[in-house]
Amino acid sequence: MTTARPLDPVAEVDAPREVCRLVADDHELAAHHTVRRTVFVEEQGVFAGSDRDALDDDPSTLHVLGLADGRPSGSVRLYPVGPGQWKGDRLAVLPGRRAGRLGIALVRFAVATAGARGGDRMVALVQQPNEVFFRRLGWERLAEPELYVGIPHVRMAIGLR
């Protein structure tokens, strides 16, 4: 049984509300996958059982964990798809944390990370109701909506330079 660490009131008050970082260990990777499973399997029913695929085991895939008030609450993964090209996907924020800015922080973190690794452009396949959210962050639509896993999605992109 693990004992929870006592809260340091000063550190907790000074801590940022939303923090994004690349997963650092197996524990954080498990938290990343738990967020995705909660959103894509349990809440939305997009996937049956698990949303994991071969990309999760690819060493070039980067897994990002989003923390809200110090708790795992969001995730996104990104990976190179060609020279200068990156793809972001599996953006997920737990239902109780969507009113905050964690989704914005996760998208900006993914874009900045891909750019810092030499990327020129990032693409994503976004659920159609989230298109406006991405447009507000500077993304542009590349094509008309298409079905992915039976749900309308929009191809979008953003320049990284």
Image (cartoon, rainbow, N blue to C red):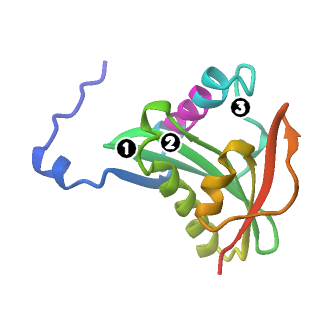
As displayed, is residue 72 above or below residue 137?
above
Marks 2,1: beta carbons within 8 A: yes
Quadrant containing the C terminus is: bottom right
Q: Position of residue 104 (x, y in %)?
A: 51, 55
* Alpha carbons under labels 2 and 3: distance apart: 15 Å
Q: Which residues are magenta?
A: 30-38
Rendered image: mark on residue 53: none
Q: Quadrant of residue 20?
A: bottom left
Which is in the foreground here, disc 1 or disc 3? Answer: 1
Dot 1: within a 10 Å radius of its alpha carbon, few (fewer than 14), some, or many (20 or more) residues? some
Q: Is residue 33 magenta?
A: yes
Point 16% across, 34% down: residue: 6
Quadrant containing the N terminus is: top left
* Alpha carbons under labels 1 and 3: distance apart: 22 Å
**Residue type (three-letter) at the residue carrying disc 1:** Ala
**Judging from the image, what secondary structure is the residue with disc 2 in?**
strand
Q: Position of residue 118 (x, y in %)?
A: 67, 77
* Alpha carbons under labels 2 and 1: distance apart: 8 Å
**Residue type (three-letter) at the residue carrying disc 3:** Asp
Dot 3: within a 10 Å radius of its alpha carbon, few (fewer than 14), some, or many (20 or more) residues? some
Q: Quadrant of residue 96?
A: top left
Going from N to C along the chain, the mark reached first, 1 or 3, is 3
Which is in the foreground here, disc 2 or disc 3? Answer: 2
Read off the residue under disc 2. 74
Q: Nearer the viewer, residue 147 or 111?
A: 147
**Judging from the image, what secondary structure is the residue with disc 3 in?**
loop
Read off the residue under disc 1. 68
Q: Is residue 67 magenta?
A: no
Read off the residue under disc 3. 51
Point 62% across, 20% down: residue: 42
**Residue type (three-letter) at the residue carrying disc 2:** Gly
**Judging from the image, what secondary structure is the residue with disc 1 in?**
strand
